[in-house]
Image: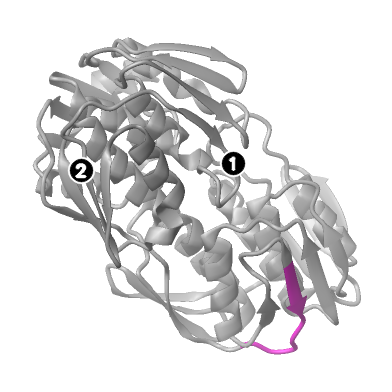
Amino acid sequence: MERIVINGGRPLYGEIEVSGMKNAALPILFATILAEDTCIIENLPEISDVSDSLEILRCMGAEIKMLDRTTVKIDTSNIICGSAPYDLARNMRGSYYVLGAELSRFGRAKAAAPGGDDFGVRPIDQHIKGFKALGAVVDTNGGCVICECREGPKGANIYMDIESVGATINIMLAASKAEGMTVIDNAAREPHIVDLANFLNSCGADITGAGTDVIKIRGVKRMHGVTYAIIPDMIEAGTYMIAAAATKSKLTVTNVIPKHLESITAKLQEMGIAVEVGDESITVDGRRTFYATKVKTLPYPGFPTDLNAQIGALMSMAEGVSMISEGVFDNRFRYAAELTRMGADIKVDGRIAVFNGVRALKPATVKAVDIRAGAAMVIAGLSAKGKTTIEDVHHIERGYENLVGKLCNAGADIRKELVPDEVAVKAN
């Protein structure tokens, strides 16, 4: 086990470069199954969810070769349907993209029911609804999801009851080689859905409307390999933008698509924080008093739920009373208890949290209860003068490439260290 130790109260400076987007990388990696060919994927983030995805593909029969630390060559010609390893797949929610890819290529699919962060009930009913509309018989047995289309998937009109990102992606995958046209109505519009569509189209798919609420997929018989680069990670960028504000720093975040960050840019400016937008960079100047605000998390282009915890850490130190209304997931506010250990004044009622801003947070020992909550603890630790220790940092490493190294290079006093065996035993 490892932990992160921060000696906080130091300003950040200079630049931090954003890595490839986790939420685009995972579906694109599993989408290579559809190519039945060799793909080269560039700008992959060096995170555990990516390495686990590659290991799942390797266990399924793909040939995997890392060309450099962010570029992988994948040959999925000899993938064996239904062979995704159960123990690895069940611990990562993104592994359910195996289902859509296999169903499209083989007419059948099998994978472990998904795991990942615990945000309360996160059903896959919309995925199953889409698979059934394409003609699949779906069964859940022994912790697995099993789908079969005896005559292959057929195009259909599918109305999404909610704007589910995962279901939109899985149906896009499943429909890419389906006979006829599939229309997804009330589709999610996130940038990583557009990135997946661009990748699939580069492989020979015929997808239009990605980025709107109606996506049309005209099934094709064959697809081919390509070289493709993942888009920058808007959540990583937003995390560093908020870190600059929380530490009263001036920091430039590079390798970004500013349009993807409009909701967070607007909210920081509303709080009184200066934000300068460049072509591929954003500079945040937090060297001033910042004020309370209200946020409601929503599907894109609304304020992202994956920045709930980070903006919550900032609100804890804002002048006045702030509020977050969580519009996507249950149980997003588990991080509030950890911030309270650092002196934050937070009251949670279901999907609403109220933050009574304090002058400063205090150092403490806290836990990363999920990926984004872990990032919030880092932001809080960077701002609090003194030594903060963050445990369970494996969550953070699922979603952030070299977070400690990037912050060190920007002036933070932060390090990872091994947890002594006797401490690790007590923690478990």
Name the secondary structure under disc 1: loop
- Residue 396 in percent (x, y) is at 36, 40
Does residue 236 appear to the left or right of 295 in the view shown? left
Q: Is residue 382 visible?
A: yes
Disc nearer the start of the sequence (2/1): 1
Report the quarter where the C terminus lies: top left
Identify the disc placed on residue 298. Answer: 1
Residue marked by disc 2: 404
The answer to whether 414 is drawn above or below residue 345 in the figure is: below
**Looking at the picture, which amino acid does disc 1 mark?**
Leu
Q: Residue at x 15, y 36 (%)?
A: 415
Does residue 368 appear to the left or right of 225 in the view shown? left
- Residue 260 in percent (x, y) is at 45, 57
**Looking at the picture, which amino acid does disc 2 mark?**
Val
Using the image as rendered, state which of residue 253 and residue 77 is in the foreground: 253
**Cα–Cα gap, marks 2 and 1:** 29 Å
The residue stretch that appears in magenta:
215-223
Does residue 29 appear to the left or right of 140 in the view shown? left
Name the secondary structure under disc 2: helix
Comparing marks 2 and 1, which lies closer to the viewer?
Answer: 1
Q: Is residue 4 visible?
A: no
Using the image as rendered, state which of residue 287 and residue 149 is in the foreground: 287
The answer to whether 99 is drawn above or below residue 118 in the figure is: below
- Residue 42 in percent (x, y) is at 37, 74
Q: Residue at x 27, y 68 (%)?
A: 69
Q: Does 217 appear in magenta?
A: yes
Using the image as rendered, state which of residue 125 and residue 142 is in the foreground: 125
Report the quarter where the N terminus lies: top left
The image quadrant that residue 40 belongs to is: bottom left
The image quadrant that residue 228 belongs to is: bottom left
Query: Dot 1, crowdedness within 10 Å: few (<14), some or many (≥20)?
Result: some
